[in-house]
Amino acid sequence: MADVPALPDSLVLEIFLQLPHNAVLSAGLTCHQWLAVSRDEFLWRELFYSYYRIPRSVPRHPAAVSWYREFKRLYDCIPCVEVQTLKEHHDQVLHLAFSHRGHRFSSCSKDCTVKLWDTERLDGTITLVHSSSMRQFNWGYTQFSQFNADDTLLLVSGVYLGPHHSSSGEIAVISLENYTLLSRVRNKPYDVFGCWLNETHLISGNLHWIGNMTSCSVLWLNKAFQDVESENVNVVKRLFKIQNINASTIRTVMVAHCRRHDTPDLLLDYEAQSQARALAQQTGHKHQPILFDLGGTDSEEEEEGCEEEDDEEQQQGEGRPLAANLSQVKYTPLEHVIQGRRSGMTEERELENKVAMLMGKSHTKASNPSVFSSSAAGEAEDMTYLLFTTGSLTYSPHQIGIKRIMPDQMTTCGPVLGEERSSDEFFDSLDHVIDIHGHIIGMGLSPDHRYLYVNSRAWPAGCVISDPMSPPPIAEEIDLHVIDLKSLREERRSLRAHRAFTPNDECFFIFLDVSRDFVASGAEDKHGYIWDRHYNICLAKLQHTDVVNSVAFSPADQELLLSASDDSTIKVWRSPRAMRLAQCPPRALRSGRNLIANLLTRRNTHLNANANVNVNGKP
């Protein structure tokens, strides 16, 4: 090589720009000059945008120190290598949940068991440590689980098989110290799932039908266990009572802990709105944007009819005709609606909907306009939000409701049924509503609880729902929306790659999960998917042989991912980088420590020898 004249760096760089990244890395091993050029920042910037097909308007991640390392992070740190398949379940696996420390995870399945797994074995393998069957409590299957904040209790949600072939939900709390069952809580409908509010209290739901299309959802705060102190205080307390119209119900509750912030008006689904606006211009109709403001008492869900405060008996109010409550409402708009019905101008469902909206408007507790307002200067108060799916146009969940939980609502102490409300305030109003314009099939929070990720299957742009029992057709493509809970609006265009095929009436929940840098989701196309949160690109597909229902990142290491499938397996995925580190010979890791230990031993021996010379006077 000494006799061969070196090429100019600029020419080498031009050559490298024409090569794929792996060829560049191989060429860099040729000589010192090529190695230096192969680490050029301009080179890796070009390779980065071309390989990952990222628009050049998207800046580099703020935490990235170089383009080369950022390329390597997306290429080498994605948990896409299958390392283990867990086959202890005997039916479809529906949900996975890690403990906050990441040392355990739980799994729920159609085999009606909840299983606990250990992730801290020295050899890196995952092993089963406990399994509990819920069939003894007349459960059909387990569907969801969640560890409390200090990883001492496990919430398990399942489908309870009641009499007359009706099914509602139930929540069980299991101690992780000795795996004993501490409590069971009713949960209706079962896809409310339930969630922890804090270390010792959980949220459940109940549902009362007060008409053919109108219902009332009650959200309850429950103490997870009965102790000596709770013998003299409440162990259950009503949080909110919310009206549902057009056959919608509250489902999928979760709690987000956020900082106080200003709240602007919410304007979402820009692409759908632009398409609807173009369609309206063609047809001559005026376009109404999907716009929701804070605190309106005439929001999407307000209705009632269960006058009694005993919300714990689900039979009370069920099947009660809405007409039984009409005599209680005495205002002229209702008389106008009834007159319209008598004249045959209004369909029965439209009548019930109008009556429900009128009752909701007059019997709903006014929202507090300062719920999302900024706090006083210097005050940094945590804000706790209850998030859930709901609707206003049809039974399929297409909106996200947000209700702030105040500090005095964090415990079951105090009035059980809300004595602070006046006698004519049956319902609580929602603090904010976000319309997704499609069927919501999954939600997940980022680790800092600032961003809400939502799986949905979109409705056709500009569609009109005339019958609540006939929602629009839903797309096969799943959109993954990103909503900023600080500004309460969609952050950017939705992510796409995964697909689903079931129709509206068979659509089921697909659980997603979010780590510091990535978001992952299952899909009905027999794959799991991983995206980068900053660049909005799909980085990996994780293959199963059936529908992937749930994915979960380890909170201790985002390069460890689990996926659960209808093929009855749980697959364990690790990153290529983690695999290389795991395959390093143990002696190589110890050699450095041995070298230091040898040096210290020689130094001590030398010092001792000198000390002996000084003391004894001998060479």
Image: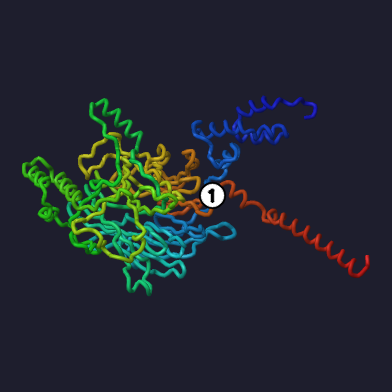
275 relative position to 319: left or right? right
Amino acid type for the residue under numbered disc 1: Glu
Observer-nearest of 156 and 232: 232
Q: Which residue is mark 1?
A: 559
Crowding at dot 1, Cα within 10 Å, few <14 / some 14-19 / many 20+, comes out as many
Position of residue 387 measured from the top left corner of the image (x, y, whole percent): 35, 51
In the image, residue 77 lies at what x, y percent? 56, 45
- Say if 397 sits above or below 167 in the image: above
Left or right side of 28 for 562:
left
Question: Quadrant of residue 269 in the image?
Answer: top left
Tell me the residue at 65%/28% (across/down). Answer: 13
Q: Position of residue 44 (x, y in %)?
A: 60, 34
Image quarter hosting the C terminus:
bottom right
Residue 274 at x, y = what percent? 33, 31
Q: Residue at x 70, y 53 (%)?
A: 588
On the picture, is 1 further left or further right than 241?
Answer: right
Please tell me which residue lies in front, 149 or 1: 149
